[in-house]
């Protein structure tokens, strides 16, 4: 985690976290809770019941106008024309070199009105990037991050707990990667069935003024407050990428095993040439999931070695609370990336064996 | 739980419980709280020789790794095997079942250089104040 100089940024829920006993840390310049009752306990609560995360630090950017869709089509790899009102998709904002500016979610209100949700650490960068790309296009890009607080309610009981707070909406009708506007416990909100945990759940966007009351209400109803620690173990088990760890400006969607968000047939977009070539010839390296064979936990930045040569790197790694073993993601040369392939990681100077295994590491049972 | 009076404490938050010339070493309640859920503990081999301030191993929580330092010099005569399958003992019982290693000390007076319970309490109060 990066440390910053100067005062830390605070979400609208900062005081509420402290009241709830949150252990606050510097997360990329934001003061956020890493845990409340404990990472393992919070992780389990999301897997078996329901937990809530403050994700208000995420950025929100609106793209509107007759050429809004064109702007997004030319700057991303997924097919924006396939969206419809009330639909969301996961997408990559790419450099001409094929690397990621950011991984994003695009919500469509109508073909001239999009709501783009971006990583907190990339908000300013993404906004400037889209503004630049909008030059000469009839499209308006606005950074509305300060207007929104966001809570993620995740777990098998999320819908059951949330429904009474949203009487005018039938949450069961909001399918995965769909959203609707409604009123949550009296607060006007956008409610989407999305999340970063691998469980069922909702992300709720409300005004900053309404957020503290809503969080307290949820906790009152038995929803467990969860922090960044559990957020990371949950997303890694579900093999969800973290910008800065698993993907960045040097990694293409093909290398990152995110080929499913690349739609070459949609037309031209930044990075298309590089990606088309990679799809044809194969990438030089691939992001794979692994488990440790020897004892030890491989973490972000630990080298993957073959003899004395460094052949890859661990991008994310942790002890998996659900699987009770050490897991991670690593970039390996293509010829070492097959399932079952064994390799060595350097953990504080000592070699430890690991093997490539299928991902996601955890998949929730469909009910 | 109050800091046990019959231990001595290092600035790196290890404690020593000395009986005769055998020192039992673990980490304090303050340290386990700061770490969070412990998921892995790496301990030295029985028979290793350690000097005071040598790294004796490491302790991993979900989020981070911390080194462990020996507060005293001597030979490792026993390690807590229970931590291999149940590292959470460090969190639930740091003063008792969460112990890590036992050392036969070369110089029992070495512990005089470590903090008393009262001094340690003062030390952690200052540390958590900033």
Image (cartoon, grey):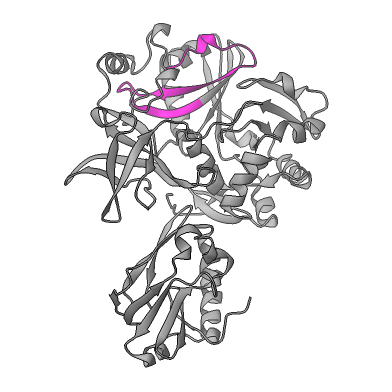
Q: Which residues are magenta?
A: A76-104
Decide which of A363, A153 is in the foreground and name it.
A363
Q: Is residue A288 left or right of residue A185?
A: left
Give the quarter of the image for residue A191.
top right
Relative height, residue B42 to residue A139 (above, below): below
In the image, residue B112 lies in the stretch drawn in magenta: no
Q: Residue shown at 41%/88% (left/top)?
A: B111
Q: How many marks?
A: 0
Relative height, residue A301 to residue B79 (above, below): above
Relative height, residue B66 to residue A309 (above, below): below
Q: Residue shown at 40%/29% (left/top)?
A: A101
Q: Residue shown at 72%/45% (left/top)?
A: A212
Q: Is residue A266 left or right of residue A85?
A: left
In the image, residue A100 lies in the stretch drawn in magenta: yes
Q: Residue shown at 65%/16% (left/top)?
A: A86
Q: Is residue A97 left or right of residue A27?
A: left
Rendered location of residue B10, percent (x, y)? 43, 79
Rendered location of residue A149, percent (x, y)? 65, 37
């Amino acid at each position: 985690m990066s440390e910053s100089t100067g005062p830390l940024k605070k979400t609208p829920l900062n005081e509420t976290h402290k009241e709830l006993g949150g252990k606050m840390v510097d997360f990329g310049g934001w003061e956020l809770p890493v845990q409340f009752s404990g990472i393992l306990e919070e992780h389990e609560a999301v897997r078996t019941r329901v937990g809530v995360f403050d994700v208000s630090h995420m950025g929100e950017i609106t793209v509107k106008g007759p050429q809004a869709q064109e702007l997004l089509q030319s700057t991303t790899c997924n097919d924006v024309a396939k969206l419809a009102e009330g639909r969301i998709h996961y997408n990559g904002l790419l450099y001409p070199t094929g690397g990621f500016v950011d991984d994003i979610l695009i919500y469509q209100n109508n073909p001239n009105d999009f709501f783009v949700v971006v990583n907190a650490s990339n908000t300013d960068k993404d906004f400037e990037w889209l503004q630049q790309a909008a030059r000469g296009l009839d499209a308006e890009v606005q950074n509305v991050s300060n207007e929104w607080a966001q809570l993620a309610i995740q777990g098998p009981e999320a819908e059951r707990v949330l429904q009474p707070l949203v009487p005018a909406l039938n949450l069961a009708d909001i399918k995965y990667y769909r959203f609707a506007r409604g009123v949550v416990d009296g607060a006007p909100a956008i409610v989407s069935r999305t999340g970063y945990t691998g469980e069922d759940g909702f992300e709720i966007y409300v005004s900053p003024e309404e957020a503290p009351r809503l969080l307290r209400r949820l906790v009152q109803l038995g929803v467990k407050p969860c922090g960044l620690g559990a957020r990371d173990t949950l997303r890694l088990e579900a093999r969800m990428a973290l910008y800065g760890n698993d993907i960045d400006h040097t990694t293409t969607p093909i290398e990152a095993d995110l080929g499913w968000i690349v739609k070459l047939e949609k037309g031209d977009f930044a990075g298309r040439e590089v990606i088309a070539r990679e799809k044809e010839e194969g990438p030089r390296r691939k992001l794979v999931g692994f488990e440790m064979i020897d004892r030890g936990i491989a973490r972000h930045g630990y080298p993957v070695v073959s003899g004395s040569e460094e052949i890859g790197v661990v991008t994310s790694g942790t002890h998996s609370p659900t699987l009770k073993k050490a897991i991670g993601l690593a970039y390996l040369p293509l010829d070492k990336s097959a399932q079952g392939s064994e390799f060595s990681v350097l953990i504080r100077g000592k070699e430890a064996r690991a093997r490539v295994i299928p991902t996601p590491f955890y998949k929730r049972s469909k009910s | 739980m109050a800091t046990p009076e019959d231990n001595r404490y290092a600035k790196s938050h290890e404690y020593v419980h000395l009986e005769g010339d055998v020192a039992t070493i673990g980490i304090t309640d303050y340290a386990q709280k700061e770490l969070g859920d412990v998921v892995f503990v790496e301990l030295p081999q029985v028979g290793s020789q350690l000097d005071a301030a040598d790294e004796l191993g490491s302790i991993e929580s979900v989020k981070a790794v911390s080194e462990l330092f020996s507060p005293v010099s001597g030979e490792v005569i026993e390690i807590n095997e229970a931590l291999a399958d149940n590292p959470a003992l460090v969190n639930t019982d740091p003063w008792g079942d969460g112990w890590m290693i036992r050392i036969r000390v070369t110089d029992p007076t070495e512990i005089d250089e470590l903090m008393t319970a009262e001094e340690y309490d003062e030390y952690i109060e200052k540390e958590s104040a900033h």
